[in-house]
Amino acid sequence: MKTKLISIGNNKVIAIPPEILEQWQGIDTFEIELENNHLTIYPVNNPRYNWEEKFKQSENQEPQEILVNDHILNNWDQEEWQW
């Protein structure tokens, strides 16, 4: 797929075709690397992308069972630790 280099002020911009942009919906940060005369562009996922929507969806769901019981007590807890 060919694209053009566009001048914007002192910068040069590569036009990314809509077919590629559709695959990157919601992503606005990218990593660019130049190695052996090849330019590689890949999206950097925002770790909090879509959290707000997921939290809203979870408000309408029943609470899930707790899978990890972190209240397991044993003698070691009582004898070795100073609380």
Image: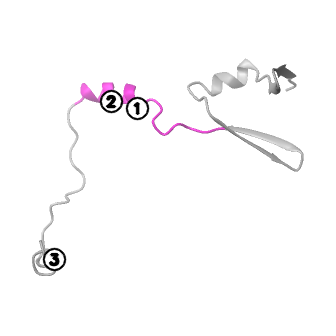
Residue range in magenta is: 43-61
Residue that appears at 72% across and 21% down: 19
Tell me if residue 67 is in the magenta stretch.
Answer: no
Q: Amino acid at mark 1?
A: Trp
Q: Amino acid at mark 3?
A: Trp
Residue that appears at 68% across and 23% down: 21
Residue beneath disc 3: 81
> From the viewer's perspective, is 73 left or right of 34?
left
Residue 29: image quadrant is top right
Indicate the position of residue 22 as horizontal and vertical percent values: 65, 22
Helix, strand or loop status at disc 3? loop
Indicate the position of residue 62 as horizontal and vertical percent values: 20, 32
- Sequence-first disc among 1 and 3: 1
Tell me if residue 60 is in the magenta stretch.
Answer: yes
Residue beneath disc 2: 55
Residue toward you, 58 or 39? 39
> From the viewer's perspective, is 31 left or right of 25?
right
> From the viewer's perspective, is 50 left or right of 61?
right
Helix, strand or loop status at disc 2? helix
Q: Which quadrant does the N terminus fall into? A: top right
Q: Is residue 35 above or below residue 16?
A: below
Between circles 2 and 3, the one closer to the viewer is 3
Q: Is residue 6 above or below residue 50?
A: above
- Sequence-first disc among 2 and 3: 2
Q: Amino acid at mark 2?
A: Phe
Coloration mode: one colour
Residue beneath disc 1: 51
Helix, strand or loop status at disc 1? helix
